[in-house]
Image (cartoon, rainbow, N blue to C red):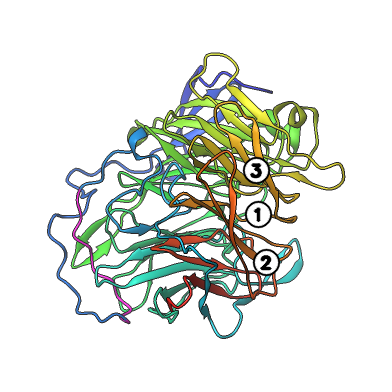
């Protein structure tokens, strides 16, 4: 199982109870299910109106958000790689845009930053049960990157999910609550998404089996819709760790049940924001061949990525899948790319301006395929032959090796920390490792690059490190600050207007800024 023919070779229509219409396309001997649950309604607004909704009188500490005045979303193409997505001002999703290549804004502090505030006073902790074993979780973990956005009332708000089973809303300047936390039924491991097109909406998953859409223009955050992972016959478990991405009114998401979804939102504003979701595509990211090869651990924990009408996702079975979603509205979503890397992939696929894929792979199974492919891999999804451009081995003789962090792209290089504690700079064209540093084991936090500065958070000794990238091939140490956390930093930092916001397993989220900026 290396690269399989992604072209559909047959199809059939099946009507299930309740009138549910499923189109099951047989792909390389596997049944991939595509559905269109309702008919597209003419006249439904898919971009915000040119005139903002009636404004809600707010103060900086207000708990409501009115609709921002926005413009039509520019279709995503190569020129948008590395830039913010949509009309909402901010870092609205994990890695900032649908190609997962926007990391925030500067200026980055020239000297070691200091803690400006710590949220909250008491640690954010919760009990969660898996397989009959109950464990206390504190703070935020992998991926855990906060979203940061500028609300229509001018307040910059930091929004994140945490292990206390809630989504939190914090004033970026003061570290105080801007709204009441939104409770869920279990811990939140992933990163939240703020609507990129100016609608006052938040998208998030939780370990309580639900993917939610939450309105932010009410007095308190209000759930408008949810999708339970048990709605499809998935495998493994029912968490939602991946970060949703929204492009042209369609939300794309993968679940730990192993299934991929494309959901038309039908967002509207008539006094208050509303949605009328319809599932356009639902398909398993696995097939019988993969299950027979690696077993039932085929969950989608990575976040989906989007580029020019294609969505890419990877799963814990090591499968990288590209789906053509250009006709998803009509229930058609053929698989156009299919590659097996051999081992668990939890990191998110990253896409460059040429449409090339950068994939970070764990080393747990230590099978022959994993050794052949490598743990940091560049793939050409448009190639006629073998799509593997290069691969870098990131192994461990004892215990797990490989990579949990999502790669960062800058200046023709790839930057990524590894599970064994190597921070790598890799030439994006050749795959040559041009530089590395030791950052300590369990380095799951993804590196970010802003203003030509590479920043990474560490775990064994909780630190934030910065490196100048005057020469992208050879980063130079710039500053290091020891985090006061008594716990590992697994979460990815959010960088906005020169401040760094990052959560820790000690139960808190902290804001860092230039000395004296508080």
Secondary structure that dominates the magenta span? loop
Magenta segment = 61-71
**Crowdedness of circle 3 by 10 Å Cα count: few (<14), some, many (20+)?**
many
The image shows residue 384 at horizontal and vertical percentages of 52, 14
Toward the right, the furthest residue is 398
Q: Residue at x 87, y 46 (%)?
A: 398
Closer to the camera in the image, 322 or 79? 79
Toward the left, the furthest residue is 51
| Residue on which the image places disc 2 | 462
Q: Secondary structure at mark 3?
A: strand
Q: Secondary structure at mark 1?
A: loop
Left or right of residue 116, residue 58 in this image = left
Q: Are marks 3 and 2 in contact (CB under 8 Å)?
A: no
| Residue on which the image places disc 1 | 444
| Residue on which the image places disc 3 | 424
Residue 234 appears in the picture as rendered = no
């Amino acid at each position: 199982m290396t690269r399989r023919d992604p072209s559909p070779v047959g199809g059939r229509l099946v009507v299930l109870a309740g009138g549910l219409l499923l189109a099951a396309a047989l792909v390389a001997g596997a049944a991939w299910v595509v559905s269109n649950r309702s008919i597209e309604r003419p006249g439904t607004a898919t971009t915000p109106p040119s005139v903002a909704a009636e404004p809600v009188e707010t103060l900086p500490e207000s708990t409501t958000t009115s609709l921002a005045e926005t413009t039509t979303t520019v279709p995503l193409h190569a020129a948008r790689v590395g830039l913010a997505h949509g009309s909402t001002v901010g870092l609205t999703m994990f890695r900032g845009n649908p190609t997962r290549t926007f990391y925030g804004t500067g200026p980055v502090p020239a000297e070691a930053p200091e803690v400006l505030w710590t949220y909250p006073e008491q640690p954010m902790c919760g009990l969660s049960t898996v397989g009959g074993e109950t464990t206390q979780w504190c703070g935020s973990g992998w991926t855990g990157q906060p979203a940061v956005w500028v609300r229509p009332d001018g307040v910059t708000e930091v929004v994140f999910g945490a292990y206390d089973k809630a989504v939190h809303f914090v004033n970026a300047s003061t570290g105080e609550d801007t709204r009441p936390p939104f409770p869920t039924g279990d811990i939140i491991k992933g990163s939240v998404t703020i609507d990129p097109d100016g609608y006052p909406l938040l998208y998030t998953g939780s370990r309580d089996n639900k993917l939610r859409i939450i309105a932010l223009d009410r007095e308190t955050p209000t759930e408008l819709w949810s999708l339970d992972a048990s709605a499809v016959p998935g495998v493994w478990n029912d968490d939602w760790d991946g970060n949703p991405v929204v492009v042209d009114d369609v939300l794309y998401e993968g679940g730990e049940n192993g299934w991929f979804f494309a959901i038309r939102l039908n967002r509207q504003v008539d006094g208050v924001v509303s949605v009328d979701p319809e599932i356009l595509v639902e398909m398993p990211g696995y097939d019988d061949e993969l299950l027979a090869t690696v077993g039932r651990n085929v969950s989608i924990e990575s976040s989906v990525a989007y580029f020019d009408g294609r969505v890419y996702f990877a799963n814990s079975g090591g499968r990288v899948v590209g789906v053509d979603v250009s006709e998803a509205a009509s229930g058609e979503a053929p698989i156009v790319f299919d590659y097996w890397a051999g081992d668990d992939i939890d990191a998110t696929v990253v896409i460059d301006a040429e449409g090339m894929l950068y994939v970070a792979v764990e080393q747990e199974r230590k099978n022959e395929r994993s050794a052949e492919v490598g743990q940091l891999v560049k793939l050409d999804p448009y190639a006629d032959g073998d799509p593997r451009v290069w691969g870098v081995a990131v192994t461990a003789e004892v215990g797990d090796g490989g990579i949990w962090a999502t790669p960062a792209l800058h200046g023709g290089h790839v930057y990524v920390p590894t599970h064994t504690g190597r921070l790598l700079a890799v030439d994006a064209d050749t795959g040559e490792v041009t530089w590395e540093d030791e950052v300590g084991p369990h380095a799951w936090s993804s590196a970010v690059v802003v203003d030509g500065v590479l920043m990474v958070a560490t775990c064994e000794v909780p630190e934030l490190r910065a490196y100048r990238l005057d020469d992208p091939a050879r980063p130079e140490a710039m500053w290091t600050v020891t985090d006061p956390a008594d716990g590992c930093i697994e979460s990815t930092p959010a960088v906005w207007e020169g401040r760094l916001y990052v959560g820790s397993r000690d139960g808190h989220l902290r804001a860092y800024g230039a000395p004296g900026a508080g």
